[in-house]
Image (cartoon, rainbow, N blue to C red):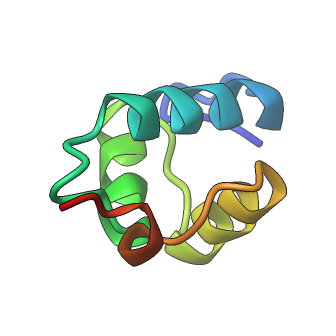
Amino acid sequence: MKNDQGEDVSTREIKKILEMSIEDENKRKPLTDEKLAKLLKEKGYPIARRTVAKYREQLDIPVARMRKEI
C-alpha cells in the first residue's frame, strides 16, 4: 500500500493509527468508519471506508454504535 507521497506503508502502521484514533475518540460520539477513513486520508493514507471496516474487524474493535458510552 502507498501513501500520498508514493511511499510504501505497512498495514500494521495503518492499523496502529486506527487504534490510536479510536482510543482518543469522544466516547459519547465515536467515530464511524467513514470518519475514520477521512481522518486517515487527512494524515496521508488514502484508504476506502470498507478497508477501514476490515482493519477494524481484524483488530476486534466493534462498530461505532457499539462503542458508544452514555
The residue sitting at 49% across, 50% down in the picture is: 46
- In percent of width and height, residue 34 lies at 36, 70
Q: Is residue 23 above or below residue 52?
A: above
Residue closest to the eye, 18 or 25: 25
Q: Quadrant of the N terminus?
A: top right
Residue closest to the eye, 10 or 17: 17
The answer to whether residue 6 is left or right of residue 44 is: right
Q: Is residue 66 above or below residue 41?
A: below
Q: Is residue 19 visible?
A: yes
- In percent of width and height, residue 37 lies at 42, 58
Task: Say which quarter of the image contains residue 17.
Answer: top right
Count of numbered labels shown in the rendering? 0
Residue closest to the eye, 25 or 7: 25
- In percent of width and height, residue 7 lies at 68, 22
The residue sitting at 42% across, 42% down in the picture is: 40
Q: Is residue 10 visible?
A: no
The answer to whether residue 11 is left or right of residue 28 is: right
Q: Is residue 47 above or below residue 21?
A: below
Task: Say which quarter of the image contains residue 28.
Answer: bottom left
Q: Quadrant of the C terminus?
A: bottom left
The residue sitting at 65% across, 34% down in the picture is: 14
Q: Is residue 64 above or below residue 10?
A: below
Residue closest to the eye, 16 or 59: 59
The residue sitting at 37% across, 76% down in the picture is: 65
The answer to whether residue 23 is left or right of residue 63 is: left
The answer to whether residue 18 is left or right of residue 54 is: left
